[in-house]
Amino acid sequence: MPSPIVVNLDAAEQARLREQMRRLRLLCPLLRLHILLLLAQHRSPTEIAEWLLCSRSSVYEVATRWRQGWRPGPETAEPDTSLALAPSLRRSLLALLRKPPAVEGWCRTRWSCATLALSLQARRGLKVSVETVRRWLHQLGWCWKRTKLSAKDNDPERGVKLARIRLVAETLRPRQALLFADELDIALLPKSGYQWMPKGTPVEVMTPGKNEKHYAAGAWDFRTGTVHYRFGPRKTNQLFRDLLDTLELRYPARRYDRIYVVVDNYKIHKAQAVERWLAAHSRFELLWLPTYCPRANPIERLFGDAHDKVTRNHKRKRLRDLVADVGRYLDRHGPWPYQLSRLYQEPEITAALRRLRKEKHAA
């Protein structure tokens, strides 16, 4: 009769236990013996993998090593821990990852699993496979993905500018509004990005031949998460003034006494036509972001989402259709509950904020 013992484990717990078991017995000699004995009984790799809770690749690896002349010896009774990621090995691997490959003599700018394996062999005399190094990197929480370009954030007035924006955000009154503005480039030439596709069969995205561009100027409301935008064929101060006209209509004088608009240092925001517009509309005030500090502008995340969901790998043939897609995305997915970046909470910004508060009270 079958055993009456039943252990109730949910799927997540079973997956965790299997992962832990695989780490503990990675290439364990006892597992090899089990695989060999089951292969001798003419069991299929699929059956063996299911019974032993291992991968089929492990079964094929043992079979290949057997054909190449490997035979289990007396030492097989002891567990093989040579491929475990021991603390000292972890430190050595992290030390390699923290410095460029050129320091170790490699003529390349990025580490690969193969170069890491060879460097570990040269350093510690440990010969491991590329796949073992890959598994170690995953255990360390590392993954293979694209880098992100960033500019040097070294504006000498950085602290004062961010503190001024934070002060407005923390003292915002009901009849005041704070908006973060920026421009979005919409190109008919698709942005290339990752997507699921059949292995060995890359998905192609056709180029338009001649690239065309359109632009959007947007403003994100800090309090409500609403985004206001205007489209235009050129990224000029006229596009920015069109956005300001939209904000004037959306934030009427009967409800708002003061409207703060945070912008970067792009030239269209400092044009004389914009200064004349601001002089004629005293409710509006521009707050300036530090130079090369896009992380301080939450609308950058919104536009990044728009690129990721709409313009990346798109297959539109007409620019106006793509522009309409961007508009629908901005309309249907709001409000956008973003928060200010952690940059605003840095000690330097907090100290500058205290000084601004003292100056405000003294005045």
Image: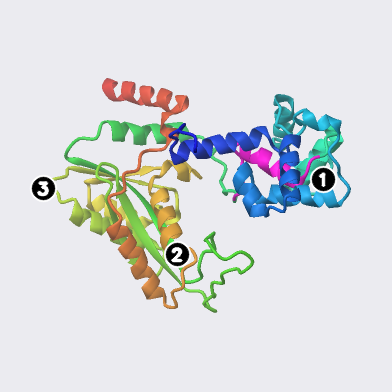
Residue 138 on the magenta span: yes
Dot 2 amino acid type:
Thr
Dot 1 amino acid type:
Trp
Q: Which residue is tagged 1? A: 106
* Tags 2 and 1 touching, CB below 8 Å: no
Q: CA distance from mark 2 to mark 1?
A: 38 Å
Dot 3 amino acid type:
Arg
Residue 11, x across and y down, in percent: 45, 41
Q: Is residue 102 above or below residue 322?
A: above
Q: Residue furthest right?
A: 69
Q: Quadrant of residue 171?
A: top left
Residue 285, x across and y down, in percent: 29, 44
- Nearer-N-terminus badge (2/3): 3
Q: Is residue 180 above or below residue 249?
A: above
Q: Callout 1: 10 Å neighbours few (<14), some, many (20+)?
A: few
Q: Callout 2: 10 Å neighbours few (<14), some, many (20+)?
A: many
Q: Which residue is tagged 3? A: 254
Q: Is residue 250 above or below residue 53?
A: below
Nearer the observer, disc 1 or disc 3?
1
What range is drawn magenta here? 128-145
Q: Which residue is tagged 2? A: 311
Residue closer to the observer: 33 or 133: 33
Q: Callout 3: 10 Å neighbours few (<14), some, many (20+)?
A: few
